[in-house]
Amino acid sequence: MAEPLRIALAGLGTVGAGVIRLLDANRELIANRAGRDIVVVAVSARDRTKDRGVDLSPFAWEDDMTVMAAREDIDVVVELVGGSDGPALTLARNAIREGKALVTANKAMIAHHGLALARDAETSGVALKFEAAVAGGIPVIKGLREGAAANVIERIYGILNGTCNYILSTMEETGRDFGDVLEDAQRLGYAEADPTFDIEGIDAAHKLSILAAIAFGAELDFANVDTTGIATLRAADIAQAEALGYVIRLIGMAETEAGDGGRPALFQRVQPYLVPYGHPLAHVDGPTNAVVTEGNFSGRLLFQGAGAGDGPTASAVVADLIDIARGEIGAPFSVPVADLDKLEPAQSGHRVGRRYIRFAVNDRPGVLAEITAAMRDAGVSIESLLQKGRPEEGGEVLVALVTHEGPESCVTRALHLLEGSPSLTAPPLVMQLLAT
Ligand code: NAP
Ligand code: HSE
């Protein structure tokens, strides 16, 4: 058997400890499949004394991750610290410049700096791999780079944040409050260190931008992902969606289209969508992720599995290590960085679809007329409209409507007409209806 692949592990939290457990539990099988042993040589984290539930005594401890990256006796640095910049980025840059392969689960860092790191990796002739950065244990990056490599990908979309999916499906099942369920997700290890990244849709946007770059052979463009999270959703929205035959899921959606002058443009959006019961994504519950790709020859492919947690994420990290042990370097974004297209961001105004719009309003005469007049004046055709309850005289009520198919620009215009109206007690909530 060839010489072992020697790794240095930075970050010993949920995922880092999971990687140690997995390498230990499946050592023999991994060595057989990789063609050589994969051994941890050195580890680093902030607190040397913390009990992590794994035996660290066989490994060298390094207080300074950057020093660890320069060790002569390692081939790969595994970055499981997190954060788009700061120590994780310094470590990643240094490791690659030292000629070490880099494996990371850090979607924030890849979304912000993936292109530059991929350029550095090409220059150094080393692998840069980040399967665990998107959809936890699901091999969706491999699926795109290898399994679906022969296809033009026309669209890619899915449930990319386990925390939000856990919150939405648990609220749906139990009727519990948003904040209460978020605490559960944090306790279970699904949420990011800063959970606003999860609930504001930023984490899903990081992942979507990475998938879009690989799927479309385009330069990563996280800055132009149109992002809305789930924090303004209310239990009443979930109940209303249910009554209409839908569930609410936070969906990341990317596709290419003809932009100005016919040049290709990239549409990227993360938003809560109403997903019809007939769609496979409607049945994705808990911290599960699912990604749908539409290829011109493969047709629709569905990748589904655990999107977060120590075991599934460690599984994706170790899959990358096995690739490296086998000598598979490959271009991180499928093609060399210089060959990636620079696509302009697509405008969304012309996008045709049905939408759910929810208004929180003061319960008083004329409010419905004001809303429907704005819809009429903006050319939005209403399919159904519902006002639920009347908690107290003159109090707040929710008015939800579903539009017929029409361009997004009309809805934007209608909401613009209602801006600043004293009838509204909160900004309106707009959700797209996902077609089956
Ligand atoms: P975590 O549990 O918070 O662990 C982070 C680790 O990094 C800890 O061991 C911590 O040390 C160490 N660390 C933090 N700042 C450091 C610093 N300045 N210097 C040295 N060490 C430092 O995070 P995690 O959930 O394992 O996530 C790690 C990465 O995987 C993140 O990029 C995350 O987005 C990604 N990811 C996580 C999941 C998941 O399900 N958790 C899934 C997919 C991807 P101490 O332990 O000593 O404090
Ligand atoms: N916080 C992330 C999630 C972890 O909830 O999906 C996995 O990337």
Image: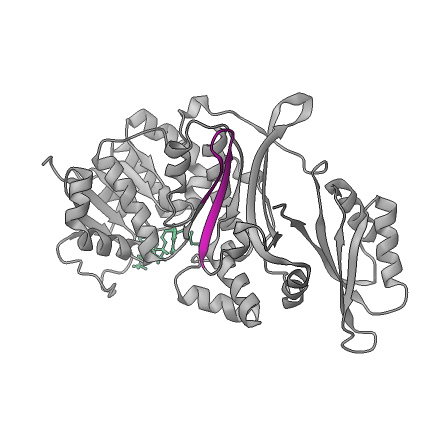
User: Residue 73 at x, y = what percent?
Assistant: 14, 39
Residue displayed at 11% across by 36% down: 3
When the figure is inspected, residue 79 is found, relative to residue 164, above or below; the finding is: above
User: Residue 385 at x, y = what percent?
Assistant: 79, 59
User: Residue 392 at x, y = what percent?
Assistant: 79, 78
Residue 345 seen anywhere in this rendered image of the structure: yes
| Image-based side of 21 in relation to 160, left or right | left
Residue displayed at 36% across by 42% down: 131
Q: Which residues are magenta?
A: 287-302
User: Residue 248 at x, y = what percent?
Assistant: 60, 57
When the figure is inspected, residue 387 is found, relative to residue 116, above or below; the finding is: below
5 or 385, which lies in front?
A: 385
When the figure is inspected, residue 176 is found, relative to residue 254, above or below; the finding is: below
Picture quarter with ligand 1 = bottom left
* Residue at the farthest front position: 278
* Residue at the farthest left position: 1
- Dominant SS in magenta: strand
Q: Quadrant of residue 366?
A: bottom right
Location of the N terminus by quadrant is top left
| Image-based side of 411 in relation to 23, left or right | right
Residue 91 seen anywhere in this rendered image of the structure: no
Residue displayed at 81% across by 56% down: 420
Residue displayed at 50% across by 68% down: 181
